[in-house]
Image (cartoon, rainbow, N blue to C red):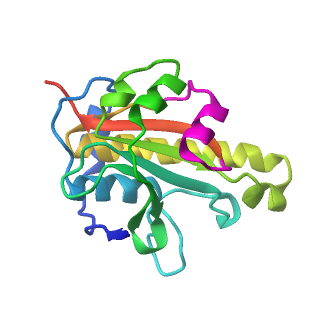
């Protein structure tokens, strides 16, 4: 089943730059479909008819894939979804949410398990290395950094919190998600505790 996401609204960048922080504690409140939509668009959304996205990509090779563990989003069933940027939609790829498993695979960083959503950003290096050789690895890592910053800024603009998590066992994440790509970053997102 495919879920089309709401359109994104404009934000003032200066405001969120001043407020951006890493957040590892989340309230028990669910996210809305609108908030999920904004986060995913910021991460890797398509910005024009040419297919360009919200982040720069070497040669427009776009090697990244975005998966989302949904634990608590109003109107969205629990499970793991894949973001389809070209349609600004998500498609469920696993029926069960796997937040606890992701937390354990991330050196027991248990805040991951309680986040309403967790973005799992993965890479298919071959899309970029076939064009740029070994230097393509560097370009892919630069791209995932841009995605992370966009997610930080969008989360901040929505009054949400997130943190970039790079400490995890790659093979375990692959096994949990049943994917072939290389996991590069996890980003739990939730409401900040005031």
Q: How many marks?
A: 0
Res 172 visible: yes
Task: Tell which residue pokes out farthest to the top in this image.
Answer: 108
State yes or no: residue 166 in magenta: yes
Rendered residue at 26%/37% (across/down):
190
Give the vertical position of 129 relative to 175 (above or below).
below
Give the vertical position of 150 relative to 55 (above or below).
above
- Residue 23 is left or right of residue 185, and the answer is left
Task: Tell which residue pokes out farthest to the right in this image.
Answer: 133
Quarter of the image that includes the N terminus = bottom left
Res 21 visible: no
State yes or no: residue 74 in magenta: no
Give the vertical position of 165 relative to 86 (above or below).
above
Rendered residue at 43%/37% (across/down):
187
Task: Tell which residue pokes out farthest to the front in this image.
Answer: 95
Quarter of the image that includes the C terminus = top left
Residue 33 x %, y %: 23, 57
Residue 77 x %, y %: 28, 54
Residue 182 x %, y %: 67, 44
Rendered residue at 70%/64% (across/down):
59
Rendered residue at 55%/29% (across/down):
166
Snapshot quadrant of residue 61: bottom right
- Residue 118 is left or right of residue 173, and the answer is left
Which residues are drawn in magenta?
Answer: 165-181
Give the vertical position of 152 relative to 21 (above or below).
below
Snapshot quadrant of residue 183: top right
Residue 111 x %, y %: 35, 24
């Amino acid at each position: 089943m495919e879920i089309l996401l709401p359109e994104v609204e404009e934000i003032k960048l200066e405001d969120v730059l001043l407020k951006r922080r890493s957040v590892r504690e989340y309230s028990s409140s669910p996210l809305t479909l609108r908030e999920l939509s904004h986060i995913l668009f910021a991460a890797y959304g398509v910005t024009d008819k040419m297919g360009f996205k919200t982040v720069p990509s070497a040669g427009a090779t776009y090697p990244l894939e975005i998966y989302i563990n949904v634990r608590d989003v109003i109107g969205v069933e629990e499970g793991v979804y894949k973001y389809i940027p070209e349609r600004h939609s998500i498609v469920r790829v696993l029926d069960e949410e796997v937040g606890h498993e992701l937390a354990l695979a991330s050196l027991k960083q248990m805040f991951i398990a309680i986040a309403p959503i967790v973005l799992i950003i993965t890479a298919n290096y071959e899309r970029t290395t076939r064009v740029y050789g070994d230097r393509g690895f560097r370009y892919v890592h630069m791209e995932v950094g841009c995605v992370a910053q966009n997610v930080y800024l969008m989360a901040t603009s929505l009054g949400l919190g997130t943190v970039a998590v790079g400490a995890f066992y790659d093979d375990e994440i692959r096994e949990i998600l049943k994917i072939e790509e290389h996991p590069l970053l996890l980003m739990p997102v939730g409401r900040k505790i005031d």
